[in-house]
Image (tube, grey):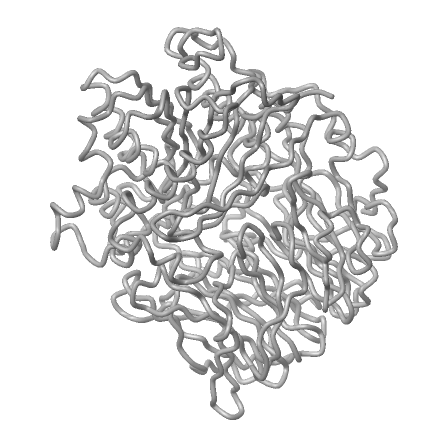
Amino acid sequence: MHPVTTADYYDFAKPSDPQLAPDGERVAFVRSVPDGDEQYEATVYVVSVGGDDPRQFTVSEGVDSQPRWSPSGDRLAFVSTRGADDDRPQLWVLPTDGGEARQVTDVPGGVVGAVWSPDGTRLAFVQSTTATEREAGLDCDVGSEEDGDEYERETPDPRVIDRLVYRRGTTYTDGAQSHVYLADLADDTVSRVTDAEYDHYAVEWGDETTLYYASSRTEPLDDSAVIDVLSFDTDAETETLVTQTTGWGALLAATEDGRVVYPRTPEEGLSMRQTDLELYDCETGESTLLTTDLDRTVDLDVGFSWDPDEERVFFATPDEGHVVVRSVAGDGSESPVNATTTGHTTGFSVAEENVAVVRSEWDHPGDVFLTTREGSDGGDGGDGDDDDTTRLTTLNADYLADRAIGEPEELRFESDGHEIQGWLLTPPEFEETETYPLAVEIHGGPHAMWSTTDTMWHEFQTLAARGYVVFWSNPRGSTGYGESHAMAIERDWGAVTMRDVMAGVELVCERDYVDGDDAFVTGGSFGGFMTGWLVGHTDFFTGAVAQRGVYDLSSFYGSTDAFKLVEWDFGTTPWEESEFLWQQSPVAHVENVTTPTLVMHADDDFRVPVNNGEMFYLFLKKLGVDTRLVRYPREGHELSRSGEPSHVVDRLDRTIRWFDGYSSHHDVPRALDRGDDGLSATEDGEDDTDNTDNEAERTE
């Protein structure tokens, strides 16, 4: 058996976005693999629920996403960058009985969230367009440009900014706003539904003439948590305000008889509060909170949907180290019940009898499973032996058969009278009579939850393979343990979280095989904040790697697209309590740092802009601490999860090199003295791995 390495990242295939066909007999999903050093290949696959091997359904060109079956199942819509010079994803439709896919749209803002009309004649979607494009009709078809030249959106020079939020992800919005559009499949024409100068999103169909969508229209824009839920009559071309909710973004799920489900999060301290599902009945005008009895937040990244009978709503929640699928009666007459109980679910789809899920577990980075709607799930670890759960894919079977994968040990420990959940992963060929250095990982958020897998599976296993005992936990502030647990760090990110993390570290270090004098710490985003906070408040750690972290709350507030996080979590602003926010920031305590600390950041990170990393690095450097700043071009805040493959690998390489250089268990120089030695990412954009599925049969 071979140990897991950083470069193994190039070998992983990851599934996402499972979609059950209307007849419940097939599941479409997206299979993504690294394609060289700078990009990914993502194609649509289809697998039978009867257990056949998955078949490649779309050609390997560009990045495909969002597969959606037509209501009759005779066509599959998907979004793809194939043939696009500028990576603008367009809408395509493919016959499911064979044949070529055809491109339906050629729009400047790309296609997001395509949904079929109930009669299968139209698809609604969202794209971001500028006022100039809308006035010229270019938003519906860039081919309509009069001179016939290829349309290219101009970058403003200079940029004139009037909004509080003017950049997201890795790009500036440059005045573009998201609007709802309709693609008519009879003639492949596109028309715009919305006109108001606001952002629109989360489009869904009710009946075949009714669209629902959300819009942020309450002034001041970007500074209000109020979200309008609206309907649009496609025959009369009239818009109606249905209801309002509050939250940090919204999704919708609607029935043909006018019942609309949407998330609701209390506005006060919103970022710490739990998100519930609420139903509004357009016929009666009454609203019902569906998840009021459930002390778990709804995971909007996974989403929610009605079942085909429009009787139950299915949704996902984090739950003590798992992300599970639950359902609740649409009338709110009963408490939610579980459809799954184990694993880390990242997507699901519901048919008449079954639920398809994509989930990962400690022993694999992700596959497609099928369970019943009542789903006992059995806690079988995903081997498919449970009567109610069937594993439909084994995308990484060949890789896993040849690797030493460790099973984490679950820990429960007390901190300040609160129970905290954590895990410990030991190296391959572990022997209790030996001693090992300790690597402590801290999650971002802060209101998030880690499991034994998901996007951290490779990193945890790689650190263990390098000889580290790896510890991670869900300290107070995390989701998955109830609202009081998440709110426990209100106005105190650093001290409370530090007590919880260090309580776990102290417990682990009581074991004879853990070398408490050779301990390291790392984390990204809020985990970067905590890494900076820890090295400023203790000299326990031998080395640290702070990644994409918030190190100064005031400068973060003034440069992020998420400034409301400071207002909600700390209940203040920099001009109201500047000294308080300074003392709550890691840079305020940098004079105490003696731990060698590597700082890594992404150049195009507009969630935690790079000025935070620059400040922390400069302070450390001025104070004579062993440090280095590594910046990744073209990357945003999602660097560790979906960055360019070579950057994902390089980030992990550099983390391990930094630890190794200060560890008494590794006889290597400091990373500061090693040059490029020990970095495994290729330089020429090529690698020798074969990411094709030799048994896959392509349809298109």
Give the left or right position of residue 582, taking residue 452 as reference.
left
Q: Position of residue 532 (x, y in %)?
A: 30, 33
Q: In this view, does 670 lie above or below 345?
A: above
Nearer to me, 295 or 239: 295
Give the left or right position of residue 457, taking residue 549 as reference.
right
Nearer to me, 495 or 390: 495
Q: Residue at x 40, y 34 (%)?
A: 506
Give the left or right position of residue 133, taking residue 569 as reference.
right
Q: Which residue is drawn at 30% across and 60% down?
A: 222
Q: In this view, does 275 lie above or below 550?
A: below
Q: Where is residue 161 in the image (x, y as percent from the top left)?
A: 25, 51
Q: Residue furthest bottom?
A: 284
Number of labels in the image equals 0
Q: Position of residue 573 (x, y in %)?
A: 18, 54
Q: Residue at x 55, y 20 (%)?
A: 467
Give the left or right position of residue 660, taking residue 380 as reference.
left
Screen quadrant of the N terminus: top right
Q: Where is residue 89 in the image (x, y as percent from the top left)?
A: 58, 48
Q: Is residue 513 above or below residue 286?
A: above
Nearer to me, 254 or 211: 254
Nearer to me, 554 or 419: 419
